[in-house]
């Protein structure tokens, strides 16, 4: 059964999602990544996109990517006009960073939410707006369930207090598991080289970054251990050398 996983939050997380999609591809899953962000960064990250097109779908290193659509159904209809048959994806990874596009996609069958936090004033305020939109129609008994991922540039006491005081006090059930994303200069260079080469090379990333990617993949795959996923990535990388 197809599963839709939402990656929500006013944070640039496109590179993380690209790497996660490749891990799922290595695990033999058919994946579609949907960019529902305001800036549509992924259009300028994946070199095979037609940046001039209002709606566009492309393929990059084992994964399909869609930009400019306002629903999953619109993407499937677009695929049918091109190929006569809509692809049967195992997972759709949905990137959302604003309440307008959340409204477009919120009625879809989203099975899991990951909420991304960056401790800057802009990110905190925009995330509060987004989270209030996500919870405004929910009752105490119908809390939305979120897993928190924090970009570890820095975490100040003031921003942590703001988050706990404003964002945590909503109809949300936060999973016990939460993650820190250590996006270093080495990881940034690795992503840039992948984008320019057309091939995602995990060997250039830091161990800490890849541990996070595989831990999140393990949660999505529901039962596949992170260690098993790392073994598959190593085997795949050896075949590509």
Image (cartoon, grey):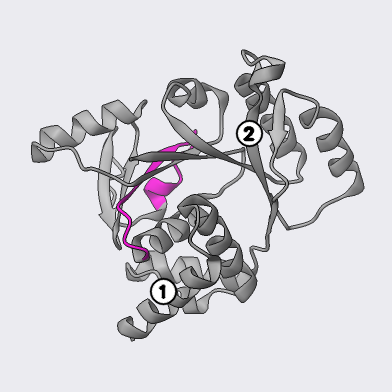
Instruction: Check the image and report above or below for 85 versus 12.
Output: above
Image quadrant for the N terminus? top left
Residue at the location (60% across, 62% down)?
A: 212
Residue at the location (47% across, 73% down)?
A: 202
Q: Residues within 10 Å of mark 2 (few under 14, many from 20)?
A: some
Instruction: Check the image and report above or below for 43 versus 71.
Output: below
Can you give x and y, in whole percent of width and height, for residue 114 in the image?
Answer: 59, 42
At numbered mark 1, what does the secondary structure look like: helix, strand or loop?
helix
Instruction: Check the image and report above or below for 193 versus 84.
Output: below
Q: Tell which residue pokes out farthest to the front in this image.
A: 223
At numbered mark 2, what does the secondary structure look like: helix, strand or loop?
strand
Q: Is residue 106 left or right of residue 173?
A: left
CA–CA distance between discs 2 and 1? 30 Å
Can you give x and y, in whole percent of width and height, for residue 157 in the image?
Answer: 91, 47
Q: Nearer the viewer, residue 238 or 15?
A: 238
Residue at the location (30% across, 52% down)?
A: 30
Q: Residues within 10 Å of mark 1 (few under 14, many from 20)?
A: some
Query: Disc number at residue 145?
Result: 2
Q: Is residue 76 left or right of residue 213?
A: left
> Which residue is label 1 attached to?
232
- Snapshot quadrant of residue 139: top right
Can you give x and y, in whole percent of width and height, for residue 85 in the image?
Answer: 12, 38
Q: Tell which residue pokes out farthest to the left in this image.
A: 84
Query: Disc number at residue 54?
Result: none
- Snapshot quadrant of residue 123: top right
Mark closest to the chain's N terminus, 2 or 1: 2
Residue at the location (46% across, 54% down)?
A: 221
Image quadrant for the C terminus? bottom left
**Which range of residues does the magenta coloring cover?**
27-44
Can you give x and y, in whole percent of width and height, for residue 46 in the image?
Answer: 36, 55
Residue 30: in magenta span: yes
Q: Is residue 187 left or right of residue 57?
A: right
């Amino acid at each position: 059964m197809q599963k839709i996983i939402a990656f929500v939050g006013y944070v640039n997380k496109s590179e993380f999602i690209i790497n996660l999609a490749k891990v799922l591809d290595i695990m033999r899953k058919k994946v579609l990544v949907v960019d529902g962000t305001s800036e549509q960064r992924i259009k300028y990250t994946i070199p095979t996109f037609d940046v001039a097109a209002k709606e566009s779908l492309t393929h990059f290193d084992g994964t399909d990517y869609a930009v400019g659509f306002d629903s999953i159904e619109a993407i499937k209809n677009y695929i049918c006009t091109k190929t006569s048959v809509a692809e049967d994806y195992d997972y759709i990874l949905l990137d959302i960073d604003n309440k307008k596009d959340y409204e477009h996609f919120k009625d879809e069958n989203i099975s899991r939410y990951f909420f991304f936090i960056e401790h800057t004033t802009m990110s905190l305020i925009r995330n509060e707006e987004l989270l209030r939109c996500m919870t405004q129609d929910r009752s105490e008994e119908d809390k939305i369930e979120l897993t928190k991922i924090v970009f570890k540039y820095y975490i100040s006491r003031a921003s942590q207090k703001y988050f706990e005081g404003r964002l945590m006090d909503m109809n949300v059930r936060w999973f016990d598991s939460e993650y820190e994303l250590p996006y270093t200069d080495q990881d940034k260079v690795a992503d840039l080289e992948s984008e320019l080469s057309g091939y995602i090379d995990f060997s250039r990333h830091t161990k800490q970054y890849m541990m996070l990617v595989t831990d999140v993949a393990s949660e999505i795959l529901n039962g596949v251990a992170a260690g098993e996923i790392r073994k598959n990535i190593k085997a795949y990388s050896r075949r590509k050398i």
